[in-house]
Amino acid sequence: MVVLAMVLGCDGDETPPVDTGTSGSSGASSGSPDDTTDSEAADSTGSDLPDIECQTDVESDLPGVSIEIDSECAQTLAQAQAGLTTSFVVGIADPLDGVDSGNSCFETPSGGVHVEWSVSGVGHHHCHCDVGLCPDYVPSPTALVPGDTAGQFEWFAYDWDGPSDFDPPFGDPFVAGTYTIEVVATGFYDDGVETMTPFTVRARRPIVLVE
């Protein structure tokens, strides 16, 4: 059916800064996360999470295809800097031929829909977007099969665009505020008139990070 591996990358997993509890540092060199659990991180902030009801906003012009994001809508900065996992589901309602959603930098998952993700807001951004120099893309249309496929990715509340060619460290930490988690698939499909009709399937979900 659909979907991607955890971070959709050609390189290894992201590595958070060693000092995940410092909100004033700007660049953090790569290293292993500390052993602080989510509950310990929450206790260390001395604050209660706000009670927030939120939903995923979905838009799609690929017939019968949607994305749903499943995540908490409020977390502490300490939890987010230590790393959060966001789950999502790509749903296909009806069979669809001639879908091309590949990317030369990433392995196109079974089912043919390549998904990318990001977390952004308050002047900050974290994604697995830049993976360095990519080979030329070769189109490979495929058929989508009805069903739901789950995926997930881990992200950290630090500025980062991806490993690129030189594995840059994480940048400035996120600050308190409202952010948007986005999962998106783009590409082309055969709509019966044009074989290269562009499409976008996008899901957005807010998350509030508190001190």
Image (cartoon, rainbow, N blue to C red):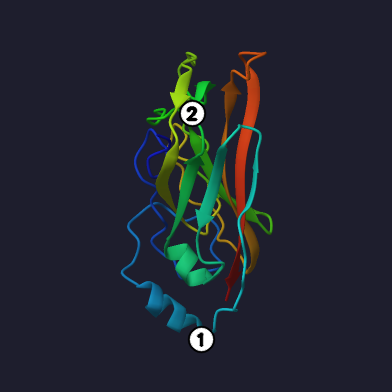
Q: Amino acid at mark 2?
A: Pro
Q: Few, some or many C-alpha atoms within 10 Å of disc 2 (few <14, some 14-19, many ≥20)?
A: few
198 or 16, which is in the foreground? Answer: 198
Residue 99 visible from this viewpoint: yes
Q: Nearer the viewer, mark 1 or mark 2?
A: 2
Q: Image check: 137 left or right of 125?
A: left
Q: How many marks?
A: 2
Please give the residue where the numbered disc 1 appears in the rendered image. 46
**Above-or-below relation of 72 to 116:** below
Give the Cα separation between the discs numbered 1 and 2.
Answer: 50 Å
Q: In this view of the protein, which residue sits in the foreground, 74 or 167? A: 74
Residue 48, placed above or below residue 18: below
**Which quarter shows the N terminus?**
top left
Q: Amino acid at mark 1?
A: Gly
Measuring 43% from the left and 44% from the top, which residue is drawn there? 148
Q: In this orientation, does residue 22 appear?
A: no
Q: Are marks 1 and 2 in contact (CB under 8 Å)?
A: no
Looking at the picture, how far across and down is residue 48, in whole percent?
54, 84
Q: Secondary structure at mark 2?
A: loop
Residue in front for this viewpoint, 2 or 19: 2
Height in image: 6 above or below 173? above
In the rendered image, residue 25, in percent from the top left (x then y), is placed at 53, 63
Residue 185 image offset from top left, x and y in percent: 55, 35
Earlier along the polypeptide chain: callout 1 or callout 2?
1
Q: Residues within 10 Å of mark 1 (few under 14, many from 20)?
A: few
